[in-house]
Amino acid sequence: MVETTENARFNVTNCIDNIEMQQVTASVVKAIEHGNTVMNRVKSELSVDYVSDLMSEVEENSEYMREVNEMLGAQGITDEDVLDELAALEEGIMDEDLLKAKSALPADVEVSGASAKTDKTAASSAKTAETASSAKSAKTASPAGERRVLAEPIPA
């Protein structure tokens, strides 16, 4: 009797294990089916021609930026000059924000510690403006026509 009970228990345990394994298999199949559906949708949205055109456009833009960087380098503008100009612009924006914040305060509140341009930043700004004005006339020929280097920074 004990042996029969043990065999029955073993059969029930095997049956439960098989059911659990079938449930896992069904979940995996559903996940694969869902993934395939998503991949088909993405494939229909992205054609090979679209990706090819996009990559060509990225390459053209990269080539244009290389040309601009070469022209800037020929004008004596270094990465340090560009970073100094960026710092000056950021400082100017912070100064404008500080002035706006000060004007919003009541008249009896005193604020100190306003930032001012350092001599180095001012000199860098002057140098960048000077090289930018000389770069204003710089041109480069391209298949799409002539391009000009921007002499003024693009507003943020």
Image: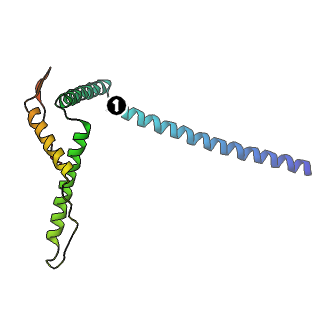
* Outermost residue, left side: 137
Residue highlighted by disc 1: 44
* Outermost residue, front side: 119
Q: How is the image coloured?
A: rainbow
Toward the viewer: 131 or 86?
131
Left or right of residue 52: residue 36? right
Residue placed at 61% from the left, 43% from the top?
24
Q: Looking at the picture, how far across and down is residue 15, in whole percent?
A: 73, 44
Report how many numbered discs are placed on residues in the image: 1
Check disc 1: other Cα within 10 Å, few if <14, some if 14-19, many if 20+.
Answer: few
Left or right of residue 142: residue 30? right
Toward the viewer: 62 or 44?
62
Residue placed at 13% from the left, 36% from the top?
131
State whether residue 111 appears in this view: yes
* Outermost residue, top side: 143
Q: Looking at the picture, how far across and down is residue 93, in whole percent?
A: 18, 55
Left or right of residue 142: residue 54? right
Can you tell which quarter of the image residue 58 is in? Answer: top left
Residue placed at 21% from the left, 27% from the top?
70
State whether residue 152 appears in this view: no
Q: Looking at the picture, how far across and down is residue 124, in whole percent?
A: 18, 44
Q: Looking at the picture, how far across and down is residue 39, in whole percent?
A: 42, 34
**For the residue labelled by badge 1, is the local secondary structure a helix, a strand or a loop?**
helix
**Kind of residue sitting beneath label 1:** Ser
